């Protein structure tokens, strides 16, 4: 055990030294605990409004958390909770969103009932029976909480990014799919998830910010895209002027931790260096060192990549130092003058599965899947799903 810990420490120091050379990177991150900060609760139940049955909504897994500051100043985490319904496989359980709060960001109290879930409302068609998943939260300039989350209509094989708003993190108003109304005929059947709205650090807190007169949202897995809004609720995808398709701003890289594909992480942050997007990279399952690097840095100049089908796990060579299929956390820098222009990204992950709770669970390959970034008491707190089963925390000192 001591040898393992020494190796992990050495790896962490190496990663930290590597990150120091990239002044735009948020981090390095360290784990303040060798255990998860939130785990499932097999005793909490509520009456499901659709089935009218008592449901152990947080029984099986608690993972993929959003994070923000609650109205009373505590750290608040809104997380995906799975019950034990359905077959024992990923994606076959029903998900709801729970709320946990903490005075120090490490020890949490979880509410006994979910705060967002499928019910007999206009969004049932988008959320039943799979539920609601993978939230990200920003604070609007007026103090309203705006959440992006995945709506999962499992029986129809449809998933979308839903928008919800709240004043207190407990009572939420659902607004429906993010692209609903932008061009209904064009985007009605588009499969999209994992969306983070652009933020900046304002008076010590992270809140949504307009850039060039509008709000921006990075969205997608496999390939990452952009969208804009004037009200944080109704969104329009940014299109490639040549193809007319959603503009691709980032895709997979051969031989890297994101060789399978990248996926949006927490809400991105506008900094003096540009827009920093913390994202989740899936390692490819392929091993060929001759696989082509399919990265598209500026898709208007790479129309072939925009027209090509998304890279699959079997297309690009994986990072041989990371488990095949594992999810790690990376960072990318985009231009503030053109939010779709990728300037740089980390060669190595800033967080990768190492501890048993990150490598053993529902997702056997292991995940550190980040979705929540919050500024608190001079630190960045990064909350992540570990092995699709529990929630972990990594921290970084904020520059003074």
Image (cartoon, rainbow, N blue to C red):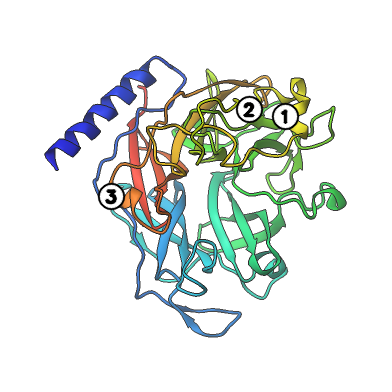
Residue 248 left/right relative to 396: right
CA distance separating discs 3 and 2: 32 Å
Q: Helix, strand or loop at disc 1?
A: helix
Instruction: Report the front residue among 113 and 167.
Output: 113
Work out which quarter of the rendered image holds the N terminus and state it: top left
Query: Residue most toward the top?
Result: 21
Mark 1 neighbour class, 10 Å CA radius: few under 14, some 14 to 19, many 20 or more: some
Q: Where is residue 349 in the image (x, y as percent from the top left)?
A: 42, 31
* Along the line of sight, the residue nearer the viewer: 236 or 322: 322
Q: Is residue 399 visible?
A: yes
Q: Residues within 10 Å of mark 3 (few under 14, many from 20)?
A: few
Q: Residue at x 49, y 28 (%)?
A: 255
Residue in the image at 75% along x and 32% along y: 306
Q: Please say if 326 is above or below 85.
A: above
Residue with the mark numbered 2: 294
Nearer to me, 53 or 91: 91
CA distance for labels 1 and 3: 38 Å
Q: Mark 3 points at which residue?
A: 356
Q: Are marks 1 and 3 in contact (CB under 8 Å)?
A: no
Kindly identify the residue that appears in the image at 44 percent across and 51 percent down.
70
In this rendering, position of residue 180 left or right of residue 123: right
State the count of labels: 3
**Element type at marker 3?**
helix
Image coordinates of residue 381 in percent, x first then y, are 38, 40
Q: Which residue lies furthest to the right in this view?
A: 185
Asked if disc 2 and disc 1 are in contact, CB closer than 8 Å, the reply is yes
Q: Which of marks 1 and 3 is nearer the N terminus?
A: 1
Vertical relation: 64 (above or below) 288: below
| Picture coordinates of residue 117, whole percent (x, y) | 56, 67
User: Judging from the image, what secondary structure is the residue with disc 2 in?
Assistant: loop
Q: Which residue is tagged 1? A: 305
């Amino acid at each position: 055990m001591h040898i393992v810990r020494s190796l992990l420490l050495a790896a962490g120091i190496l990663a930290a030294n590597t990150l120091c050379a990239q002044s735009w990177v948020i981090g390095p991150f360290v784990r303040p605990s060798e255990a998860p900060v939130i785990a499932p609760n097999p005793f909490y139940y509520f009456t499901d409004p659709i089935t009218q049955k008592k449901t152990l909504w947080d029984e099986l897994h608690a993972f993929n958390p959003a994070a923000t500051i609650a109205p009373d100043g505590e750290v608040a985490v809104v997380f995906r909770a799975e019950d034990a319904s359905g077959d024992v496989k990923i994606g076959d359980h029903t998900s709801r969103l729970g709320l946990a709060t903490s005075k120090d960001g490490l020890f949490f109290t979880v509410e006994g009932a979910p705060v967002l879930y499928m019910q007999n409302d206009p969004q049932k068609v988008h959320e039943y029976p799979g539920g609601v998943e993978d939230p990200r939260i920003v604070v609007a300039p007026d103090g309203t909480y705006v959440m992006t989350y995945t709506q999962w209509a499992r029986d129809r094989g449809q998933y979308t990014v839903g928008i919800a708003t709240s004043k207190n993190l407990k009572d939420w108003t659902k607004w429906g799919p993010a692209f609903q109304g932008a061009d209904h005929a064009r985007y009605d059947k588009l499969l999209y998830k994992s969306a983070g709205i652009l933020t900046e650090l304002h008076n010590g807190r992270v809140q949504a910010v307009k850039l060039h007169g509008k709000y921006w949202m990075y969205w997608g897995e496999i390939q990452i895209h952009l969208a804009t809004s004037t009200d944080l609720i109704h969104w329009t995808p940014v299109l490639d002027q040549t193809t007319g398709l959603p503009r691709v701003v980032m895709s997979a890289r051969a031989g890297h931790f994101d060789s399978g594909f990248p996926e949006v992480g927490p809400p991105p942050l506008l900094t003096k260096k540009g827009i920093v997007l913390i994202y989740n990279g899936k390692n490819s399952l392929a091993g060929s060192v001759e696989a082509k690097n399919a990265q598209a840095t500026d898709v208007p100049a790479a129309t072939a990549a925009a027209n090509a089908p998304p890279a699959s796990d079997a297309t690009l060579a994986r990072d041989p130092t990371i488990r095949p299929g594992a999810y790690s956390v990376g960072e990318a820098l985009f231009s503030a003058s053109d939010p779709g222009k990728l300037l740089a990204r980390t060669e190595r992950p800033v967080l990768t599965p190492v501890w048993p709770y990150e490598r053993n669970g529902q997702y056997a390959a292991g995940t550190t899947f980040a979705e929540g970034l919050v500024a608190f008491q001079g630190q960045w707190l990064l909350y992540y799903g570990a092995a699709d089963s529990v929630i972990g925390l990594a921290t970084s000192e904020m520059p003074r």
